Image (spheres, rainbow, N blue to C red):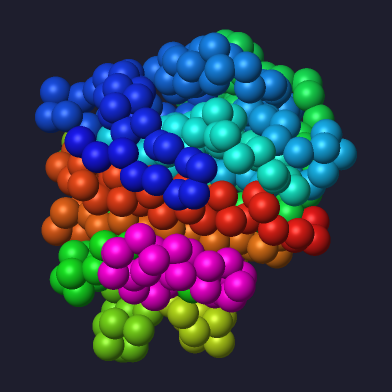
Amino acid sequence: MKNFTSPGLLLDMAAFHALFDAVAAVGCTPLGGLNRVAASHEDGQSRDLVCAWLAQRHFKISVDRVGNIYALLTLADPTAPWVLTGSHLDSQPRGGRFDGAYGVIGACIVADAMRTCAQQQFSHNLGVVIWTNEEGARFSPSMLGSGVFAGRYTSDFALSRQDVHGVTLAQALGQIGYLGDSEAPAVPAAYVELHIEQGGLLEISNAGIGVVEGNWGAVKYAVTLRGTAAHTGPTPMEQRRDALLAAAKLVVACRAISDATFGKLLTSVGRMDIEPNSSNVIAGSVTVYADLRTTDNALLIESSLEFERAASTIAADAKIEVDLQQVVNRPAGIFDTGLCTLVEQVATAKGYRPMRLSTIAGHDAIALCPLCPTAMIFVPSKDGISHNEAEFTSSTDLEAGLDVLGGTLHELLRKPLTP
């Protein structure tokens, strides 16, 4: 195990692995993944564990109204701007243990190294942030906590989101003790997020560090098709108002929209809620959750309209009702060019092979892009697998990412940035 250094900075990799393994054990599935959806009991336990670790090291911890956790460290004048780093602890229902948590634990270790750094000539203060409900697996839309911080959503909107059982985010956060009342910190001078790639480009290219230049655009829909529940036996075929049949056609139509672009547009349907969901009853209502992504904002708009037309046509042909809600509309964007260059320079200076790429997946960093200079650092994902219990990144790659995060933040904290 190697301890990497920047001038005056020593990262404790043993502490990183110990804390990472402890957090990964909370909500661990039999196959080594995670079931730690937002504001669940397991999410609360993981938050408690990380907060206790930070409190022992004298970070000032606060929780805002939507459960975002801020662990602040005064390294310069208390009135100096903040640099934030972090990610999220919530997971998919059967997700991997690296997604999100790696960025949180990595931020903790780097920040602690800054705290004990012998060279205390910083112009900025540092904060570790743990965002609420990045995944959107329990409460929709995703990236709620960072979205509130960035002003995209109101706190009241976020807290009123419900899971499939009708439990609101406010209720769930209250149950685990993270319905806070503190004000969020001021707009940071910069935000840097460390994350696994969740794709295979770095591995294929034999690159050790991903320098994220921007994000793909994404539009997400919740389409509810309402037919008539009826007995699957005696109901004549011509009288059926089958919402599931219409939903199946919409799934196929969604894929066809992508096929027509030869892969330039990515589409998927990963979830359907079926009522009454009985083998003996024709589906009376189905909600289809569709996802469209591309780097081309014009294509995203055009394809979204095409999807909406397809949903309306399919519902009309089936003689059923349709309620179409666009729950996410996130245009393609770019990250701060200066920070991208800095990450690239730090990685190169430390002997890693950086590669510039865009993120297809959504991240909290995307929400902060319009707010402040933002950067993301990627490390390779084995076989590009993510949102899966088989998700894996080697210890060597994990430590390399921390090394680059440490070097990047060390430079940022000493530079005169404008908040």
Q: Which residue occupies the foreground of this view, 187 or 265?
A: 187
Q: Which residue occupies the foreground of this view, 235 or 253?
A: 253
Q: Is 163 drawn above or below residue 338 in the view shown? A: above
Left or right: residue 415 compared with residue 337: right
Image: magenta residue range: 330-358
Left or right: residue 111 compared with residue 361: right
Residue 21 shows up from this direction: yes
Q: Which residue occupies the foreground of this view, 105 or 48?
A: 105
Which image quarter is the N terminus in?
top left
Assess whether residue 45 is covered by the magenta stretch.
Answer: no
Left or right: residue 23 compared with residue 345: left
Q: Residue at x 14, y 23 (%)?
A: 30
Percent coordinates x, y for residue 210 in the rendering: 36, 65
Assess whether residue 344 is covered by the magenta stretch.
Answer: yes
Which image quarter is the C terminus in?
bottom right
Q: Which residue occupies the foreground of this view, 264 or 45?
A: 45
Q: Is 229 drawn above or below residue 188 in the view shown? A: above
How many numbered discs sit on the rendered protein? 0
Residue 292 shows up from this direction: no
Q: Residue at x 49, y 16 (%)?
A: 53
